[in-house]
Amino acid sequence: MPDSSSATGLHTEEHNPALLHHFADPEQQRDAASLGMWVFLATEIMFFGGLFCAYLVYRRWYFGDFAAASRTINMAYGATNTAVLICSSLTVVLAVWAAQTARRTLLITSLILTMLLGLVFLGIKGIEYREKFTEHHVPGASFRFVQPIPGHPGQYANPRHAQIFFSLYFVMTGLHALHMIIGLGIFLWLLTMAWKGRFTPEWHTPVEMGGLYWHFVDIVWIYLFPLLYLIDRHP
Amino acid sequence: MPTAIAQPVERENYLNTKYGVWSWLLTTDHKRIALLYLLSITFFFFIGGFFALLIRLELLTPAGDLVQADTYNKLFTMHGMVMVFFFLIPSIPATLGNFLVPMMIGAKDLAFPRINLLSWYLYIIGGVMMLHCMLTGGVDTGWTFYAPFSTNFTNTKIVEAGLAIFVAGFSSILTGLNFVVTIHRMRAPGMTWSRLPLFIWAHYATSIIQLLGTPVVAVTIVLVAAERALHLGIFDPRLGGDPLLFQHLFWFYSHPAVYIMILPSMGVITEIIACFSRKRIFGYSFVAFSSIAIAVFGFLVWAHHMFVAGMSVYAALVFSLLSYAVAIPSAIKVFNWTATLYKGSIRYDAPMLYAFGFLGLFTIGGLTGLFLAALGIDVHVTDTYFVVAHFHYIMVGGAVMGYLGGMHFWWPKISGKLYPEGWARLAALIVFIGFNLTFFPQFVLGYMGMPRRYYDYSHMPEFQVLNVLSTAGATVLGVGYLLPMIYFLWSMRYGKPASDNPWNAAGLEWKTASPPPTFNFDEEPVVTWEAYNYEELDAPHSQEVPVAR
Amino acid sequence: MSAHSSASATSPLKGYFAVWIALLVGTGLTVYAATLDLAPYNAAIALAIATIKATLVALFFMHVWHAGEKLIKLVVIAALFFLMLLLGLTMTDYATRPWS
């Protein structure tokens, strides 16, 4: 609850140029931004949640086929990407700390590192997608899938059900990648602001908010990795 | 020579502070954005109404003789899509909510004014896309665009319509986000949660639904578009996909969506009943918490739209029971409104007439929902006109009545002018009569077995009489809707100027000028009284006197 | 001054690096566990590890642990609750269909 001293038009105290007019004080503005970003992330949980629901239904129905399909996506790439994103979350948290403690060089370095790691992630993803394309595992007219069901010698996976797996794979990782790209855009904007010296220990809300978004995208991948890549990896 | 009359200097308010198209199109003032929305949703209301007119004209005769079957499919689809996504969902929150939420809590604006403007632009973009889709062929799947018809078999413009709804859905999400953050962070000093007008509680609950439900239908639209455009199929039975999964994901949003449509209306009704009974709402906490309960319970019942679609009958049992539970908080509200009226000092101004209409029609609509929640009955009346009548009683008899009541109640605040009370009461009566004439026969038709979404009922010509009554009612209803449009516009030029508080109503919005200044209050209010303090307002020493009309 | 660091007077860096290591270890553990035949618990273990990792990110990288008021925690819990409703109630249908 803001305690206010603002009368009409009279600014008796100096305030940060970033303070917007309809807020009583910078703290209210930052609290509003923070709550706003968290509420937005809640909507994103539900957005991805619909896909997880579809995944849950079909994995239960077609476990063997899903397991077979899961084996054909590259676990090494997936695990590497998981590590890449975890490292990028670290650089994000360092960026926020740098902004809090007026360490401009560290801030800029961390932002750049984060973006580089994001690009590495997308690059590896691109390689994976290309692999799937050449193996004819992209759903559509040219889909072909001949793989045994793990643990059931002599049985082959139903290619139609495998197509459902790959549909989910492409939609879920594709949507995630889209969020990464948007995240890169956000961090580019943060980088330019940081370069111009706009962030201070008193005001660095965009860095914090951008960080929250990035961490969320990381968390989505933390769930996607085992669900898509690790259904059945028994040798 | 006539003497020159000194013109009074017009005080600065949000309407006259700046002129010009760009001052409106680039505004971040929540009140101006509310008016932008008002114009836009009124436009789409007429588009949706136009489709309704064509539907009712076709159904005048048993034979399908006005339009072809495919065209008729498009008519009811576009009617549904436009009315649900471009009229009902935004209606009260984007107009009255945008205008009043900051004022009622004593704030200068919403938490994120620029996002508010973005919301409106997203709505317009979605609307333009939908218009373009309609003009270039439209969609014929029903507003529910079930798979696999929508994904694999129809040739109509599903992707475009879906994207239009996706964009409009974002508008809805951002509005909800703005309201939640505003209500949490920007209440004036002294405005505790228990002093908030119940209109605010209703919009808070609505926002929760908008935030948590809309993303699910958004991703479902993405899946449908992906299935059509990229052949990424997960609803295709030929691949082993389950069409019912689509229905689960679709209705997970679309059922709570109906609570998005009704909760704000309930908030309006609460304000009106309190003011025109001159009493504090009976059971404030119950009404407040019932709003939240409706929002939460509303997420538990979606599969009651799927009882006969092939879902598990055991799950159907669960959802049926839960659907009974969701009626309870709504019933609590009806009881509390009624108890508020008891021994109140009732005035029958137009807003109150709409409130009375709401009470009766919402109750009928709600009770018939319970019939539908019973599995045994649902098997017989699902996909008949019984369902159509049920939801129109709530959507039109409930939500639209509340919307109109609210528009009348706050019109003096919004425009600074009084609407003509005589015409308003007449219009309310015409709306009520027209509504019942349109939709009550549909209960009977459905019970008798007339299926919905049929353009031709010549196999059962005895349905014609009731259909003719229904179409006649629709015409009357249309007149009833046109009248407020005319006299509201008239009042902006010729209406009597309104005082700050023509109704002597409780609420912070009435403590500032009509129309309000751009930043709402000359000084930040400090709240030291409880909500609905009508006893104080009506006390003999009070300055304000109820306006005699 | 940011409220986020007010709770820890000392530098939070050690904590951040500790969480980072824990997350990497967790990733390795997930991969390793997937190669073991622990059916029918493979999925549960994978999800449990993922949840621990996600919780670490949320609590310490996103500063939920140090959040002054309960509201943020409520927002997260509410979203997860409704997600569980979506998954759980949908499964009441799929899990009780007597036909395939």
Image (cartoon, grey):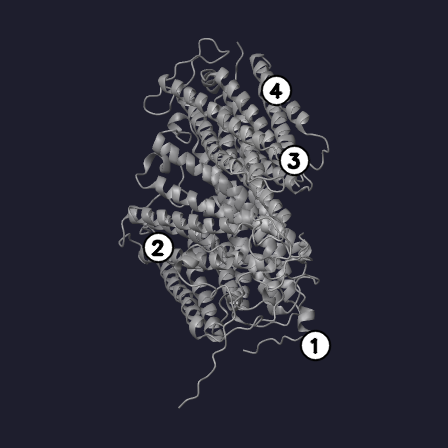
CA–CA distance in space, label 4 to label 3: 20 Å
- Residue under disc 4 on the same chain as residue under disc 2: no
Residue found at the far right of this picture: C9
Q: How crowded is mark 1: few (under 14 residues within 10 Å), some or many (20 or more)?
A: few
Residue mark closest to the camera, 4 vs 2: 4
Q: Position of residue B367 (x, y in %)?
A: 55, 54
CA–CA distance in space, label 3 to label 1: 52 Å
> Which labelled disc corresponds to residue B51?
2
> Which labelled disc corresponds to residue C64?
3
Image quarter of residue B322 = top right
Q: What residue is disc 4 on?
A: C26
CA–CA distance in space, label 4 to label 2: 57 Å
Q: Are marks 3 and 1 in contact (CB under 8 Å)?
A: no
Q: What element carries label 4?
A: helix
Q: How crowded is mark 2: few (under 14 residues within 10 Å), some or many (20 or more)?
A: many
B2, above or below B345, in the image = below
Res. B235 in view: yes
Which amino acid lies under the numbered mark 4 shown in the image of this protein?
A: Gly
Q: What element carries label 3?
A: loop
Which amino acid lies under the numbered mark 2 shown in the image of this protein?
A: Phe
Residue mark closest to the camera, 3 vs 2: 3
Which amino acid lies under the numbered mark 1 shown in the image of this protein?
A: His
Question: Mark 3, chain letter?
Answer: C
Q: Position of residue B359 (x, y in %)?
A: 55, 61
